Amino acid sequence: MTDIGIIFKIATVGIIVAILDKIFESMGREEQATLVTLAGLVVVLMMVIGMISNLFDSIKTMFQF
Amino acid sequence: MEIIQVVVIGLVSTIIILLLKDERPEIAIQLSIACGIIIFFIMLSKITAVIQALEQIANKVNIDTVYLNTVLKIIGIAYISSFGVEICKDAGQNSIGSKIEFAGKILIIIMAMPIIMAIIDMIIKIMP
């Protein structure tokens, strides 16, 4: 697993989503703001779910489930 | 040294989580999950070494491998359920965390049932 890389990827996605959210709110387009938030959430969720499935696979093989 | 790597990753992700906590709490929680998984993967090789040492000891004392496998499964269940419980508690969902803990305990009891039966049979045999 790329150790710190994945943490910084998730951090950048989070920061970008937070900034875009504020920009859209200041421009007055509320619905785009929530859409951007959802998009960011889905991107991060895909990454984290991939890592969780790797974790559970390695635990299964290691503890002879 | 792995411990330095683990501490550095833990501190860096804690700081980033604090940054994201008030605006995007959902991404902060996923970041803590990712950090936990990375730390587990760093320690993966060490855990497999410990398990192999346990198996060698069990073979030397010729304990039946069924018991060792059950113990390893119980450790696995305990680790996964505590992983889930702590993340739920971090997110503030204590009730969900305690439900997961409850399910984990039941599964562990079921796993340990054959060992308990074997011990009771042995005791009955020894009793006069």
Image (cartoon, grey):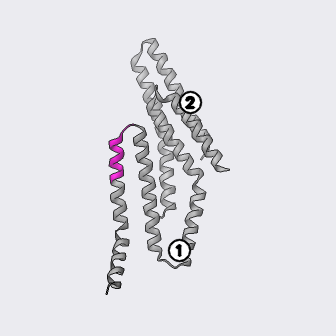
Q: Nearer the viewer, mark 1 or mark 2?
A: 1
Residue at point 49%, 24% (across, down)? A18
Identify residue type, mark 1: Ala
Query: Which of the 4 image quadrants contains residue B13?
Result: top right
Q: Is residue B60 above or below residue B89?
A: below
Q: Residues within 10 Å of mark 1 (few under 14, many from 20)?
A: some
Q: Does the segment drawn in magenta span residue A30?
A: no
Instruction: Name the residue that disc number 1 marks.
Output: B58
Q: Does the segment drawn in magenta span residue B96?
A: yes
Residue at point 46%, 59% (across, down)? B76
Q: What is the x, y in percent for residue B68?
A: 47, 70
**Chain for disc number 1:** B
Residue B72, numbered label: none
Where disc 1 sits, the SS reads: helix
Q: Is residue B114 above or below residue B50?
A: below
Q: What is the x, y in percent for residue B46?
A: 60, 58
Exactly how many numbered labels are in the figure?
Answer: 2
Q: What is the x, y in percent for residue B103?
A: 33, 54
Q: CA distance from mark 1 to mark 2?
A: 48 Å
Horizontally, is A57 left or right of A4 in the view? Answer: left
Identify residue type, mark 2: Thr
Q: Residues within 10 Å of mark 2 (few under 14, many from 20)?
A: few
Task: Please name whichever residue, B112 or A57, is drawn nearer the observer in this view of the structure.
Answer: B112
Residue at point 68%, 50% (across, down)? B1
Q: Which residues are magenta?
A: B92-102
- For residue B21, say whether it is visible: yes
Q: Is most of the magenta stretch helix, strand or loop?
A: helix
Instruction: Name the residue that disc number 2 marks.
Output: A12
